[in-house]
Image (tube, rainbow, N blue to C red):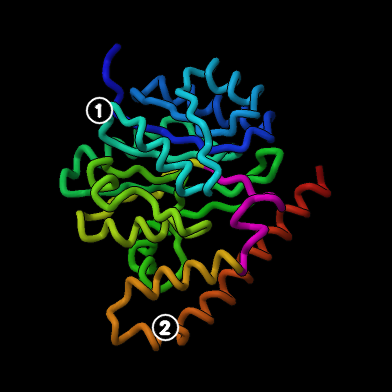
Amino acid sequence: MPQADILVILPTLGDRLEMLADTLATVAEQRETVDLTLVAVMPTKAVEARAMAAAAGAIVVDDPKTGISEAINCGLAVRNGESYYAWIGDDDLFRPGGLRRLQDLLEVNPKAVLAYGGCDYVDPNGLTIATSNAGELAKFLLPWGPDLIPHPGTMIRLDALMDIGGFDAQLKYAMDLDAFLKLRSYGTFVNTRETVSAFRWHPDSLTVAGRLSSSKEAERVKRRHLPRMLQPLSPLWHYPWRWASAYAAQHVSNRARKLAAAA
């Protein structure tokens, strides 16, 4: 079998089968333009989900039951020569040609370690609520403002990701932010405003339901990556950004409710 270029990791509890089916379908669509290995990390009791993933050509790995970061790291351990890493949640979607676009960005920029694109926010029915495509601004804001680099719309060189030790198992929400900040010393970030993925916005999404906890963890992560002399000053900008992020999240949630009511 030819060696794949991209290691796609899909962690799931296996309890959202209809959405998981949609996600697996978009991964299958990516195979038309890229060579990928799909690794699905899930509990042993998720029998139906495991069967679905296996039927979609995934390598199924047991969930270590120690958090999402360790689940992703278990997926990374399956690496077998792939050059790039991509992540997809069990209710998120890749847009057609999305992985191809990100891979092309990395291949034409050999000094780049991470590529990212635009990400649609969609409701549970797949209707687009809003789109995040901050482009270059996302890189500028990353160390001190909101994280506008969407994890499901990101591709990372695997050698660099392994060099930083994968994802911090102590983090529940901001493990991707932490990894992005560490990766800055390994190379440049490149981007496209083209939409390459979609994040499903619904009440039981980990980062939506735990907005305050997510913000606080992200602030701790950003603080520890700041120069020591700036760390005590970080509340001066973290608190305003927390408020702004909460306001933006509420706006998206209101938009989602309006779309649901209209439907």
Q: Where in the figure is residue 166, as x and y percent of width and height?
A: 34, 48
Residue appearing at x 30%, y 23% in the figure: 4
Type of the residue with mark 2: Ser
Q: Mark 1 sits on what residue?
A: 81
Secondary structure found at label 2: loop
* Residue 6 in the figure: left or right of residue 119: left
Asked where in the image residue 154 lies, by quadrant, the reply is top left
| Disc 2 from disc 1: Cα separation | 40 Å
Q: Is residue 98 visible?
A: no
Q: For the C terminus, which image quadrant? A: top right
Q: Mark 2 sits on what residue?
A: 234
Of residues 74 and 216, which is closer to you in this image? 74
Secondary structure found at label 1: loop
| 16 relative to 149, above or below | above
Type of the residue with mark 1: Gly
- Would you say residue 102 sits in the magenta stretch? no
